[in-house]
Image: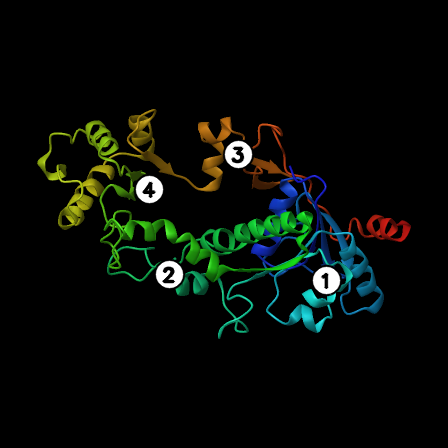
Amino acid sequence: MLEGLRVMEIEGLGPAPFAAMMLADLGADVIVVHRKNGRPAPGMPERSILDRGKRSIELDLKDKDDLVRLKRLTKKSEALIEGFRPGVMERLGLGPDDLQQVNPDLVYGRMTGWGQSGPRAHTAGHDLNYVSLSGAAWYGGNAGDPPFTPPTLVGDIGGGALYLVAGILSGVMAARAGRGGCVVDAAIVDGSAHMMNLLMALCQTGGLSMDRGASLLDGPHWSRCYACADGGFISVQCLEPKFYAAFLALMGLDEDPDFAAQFDAAQWPRQTALLAGRFALEPRNHWEALFEGSDACVAPALDPLQAATDPHMAARNVWHEVDGALQAAPAPRFSSCPDRMPGPVPQRGEHTRSVLDWLESE
């Protein structure tokens, strides 16, 4: 879908390489600039899934000759992605003003936690800090307990990488329409706050409370995960009355007066305790079989290895093991590009010679 789009990525951490991976999954030619003679960040493998489908070159951004090479590559790219603190790229002579002199149509994508401006812009932080400040972590956890640390999918990916992808593509469309390049300031605090608008809409109907555990999606007995007898977990989220009725019928609780009031928040704690006791009597596969094919809005809570063998996930070919690494297939799907598989993961610097030869031949 993005064939013909060339993106240059400056090696970084977390959401920036994920955004570049997604663009590569969608068909863009992504050239990742790895540090010359560098090593992966602590905890990251030598060959990362996040580099799949990209071409890898190694450059020293403090070397004058390599800076010339990078600027030549900038001239042939429509977008750049970097994920450093504000000011780092400017000190290298590679800020937006520098590179847009080389390529006025360049879309300069900047991925940070706090953003390019504001009192916290130059301070350190991590995913939990960003989504906590933005309000996105507020409803994570039960009433009376501190918000728990959500997976970095909420901030780094949801509020960060996906907003950077949308920003890059928007900027490229504008540049191709003759409106010139731009800087995309993709901040996790901005994106994760923006995602909260779905919940903010519930405020207009009274469905969202600022008190934790008292809202439609974080307090009811019909919107949570329960432990099963074998240590597995089952998720329940039957919001609409017709789905709640289907859930109660399969549980044999449709005539039980304890569960008649679906939306009475005062009864939710007791109803939750009753359901917890019921689910704890049987293993997860019992509950999976009971709700299979129903509209009760119940599904097992699986780890990625378990998800890979689930019949629905397997039918859609979602999970794959490539070179010993479990990874998910590209998303979303397109009717014109069926059965897309992720590209190979390159060795660091694997394409340095071929890319430099191409630049010199132009």
| Residue 236 in view | yes
Query: Which is nearer the eye, 183 or 49?
Result: 183
Q: CA distance from mark 4 to mark 2?
A: 32 Å
Task: Determine crowd level at label 3: few under 14, some 14-19, many 20+ residues with C-alpha closer than 10 A.
Answer: some
Tag 4 or tag 1, which sits nearer the N-term? 1
Q: CA distance from mark 1 to mark 4?
A: 56 Å
- Asked whether the residues under the numbered discs 3 and 2 touch, taking CB atoms below 8 Å apart as contact, a structural biologist would say no
- Asked whether the residues under the numbered discs 4 and 2 touch, taking CB atoms below 8 Å apart as contact, a structural biologist would say no
Tag 2 or tag 4, which sits nearer the N-term? 2
Residue placed at 71% from the left, 51% from the top?
A: 78
Q: Nearer the viewer, mark 1 or mark 2?
A: 1
Q: What's under tag 2, amino acid-wise?
A: Gly
Mark 2 sits on what residue? Answer: 135
Tag 3 or tag 4, which sits nearer the N-term? 4
Label 2's element? Answer: loop
162 with respect to 253 (left or right): right
Q: Which mark, residue 318?
A: 3
250 with respect to 150 (left or right): left
Q: CA distance from mark 3 to mark 1?
A: 39 Å
Q: What's under tag 1, amino acid-wise?
A: Gln
Q: CA distance from mark 4 to mark 3?
A: 25 Å
Mark 4 sits on what residue? Answer: 231
Tag 2 or tag 1, which sits nearer the N-term? 1
Residue 272, picture quadrant? top left
Q: Position of residue 138 (x, y in %)?
A: 34, 59
Tag 1 or tag 3, which sits nearer the N-term? 1
